Amino acid sequence: MNMRLVVVSCLMAASVACSGGKSTAVALIDQFPQAERKSVLPLDQAYSIMNVAINGETHKCIYMHPTSRLTFKGVTIPKDAWLRVWVALRPEVWAKAGDGVLFRFGVSDGRTYDDLVRQHVDPANNQSDRRWIPLEVDLSSYGGLSVDLIFNTVSSLPGHGDNPANDWAVWADPEVYVQH
């Protein structure tokens, strides 16, 4: 399936405007227990659900230590649907050595995989990454289909080795919603 990538990052000051007129169709964090989990680490070390506060804003999160893959299988995508999620590294590691995490999101229809998001977050070396980074992805081309939603965390950028030090990655409040 060929789809044009659309990622909208709302500025923190404009986040209220970005959330108007939308209703949640699938709260993915509620489906976490049924999701397929893979990791280079033991699963109890790689994954957990937690609340994370950054700059006074708290979100319910899926902690995914790289390198890990979380797959929500057979999600029926409504017409005009979008994915909304915030990504970050936990504040406890911002000042510690590391090279950040590559967050990836994609969709598979069972035949093909569409890589829709690649977001590198490196708060140790980039002060502007010391925040929630909002991502929105247009899923409307999958409307009416049952697909797999695949979330990946990778310990380093391609070609930069494998440095998992202080890679405390979180996906916050992932949901599929419909724009009204």
Image (spheres, rainbow, N blue to C red):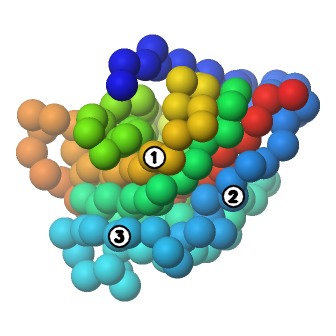
Q: Choose the circle earlier in sequence order: 1 or 3.
A: 3
Q: CA distance from mark 2 to mark 3?
A: 17 Å
Helix, strand or loop at disc 3?
A: strand
Closer to viewer: mark 1 or mark 3: 1
- Tag 1: amino acid: Val
Q: Position of residue 77 (x, y in %)?
A: 60, 42
Between 110 and 121, the residue placed more toward the observer is: 110
On screen, 132 above or below 21?
A: below
Q: Choose the circle earlier in sequence order: 1 or 2.
A: 2
On screen, 1 above or below 101?
A: above
Circle count: 3
User: Do the CB atoms of the residues marked 2 and 3 lie less than 8 Å apart?
Assistant: no
Q: CA distance from mark 1 to mark 2?
A: 15 Å
Between 112 and 97, the residue placed more toward the observer is: 112
For disc 2, the marked residue is 27
Classify residue 124 by image quadrant: top left
Quadrant containing the C terminus is top right
Q: CA distance from mark 1 to mark 3?
A: 16 Å
For disc 3, the marked residue is 37
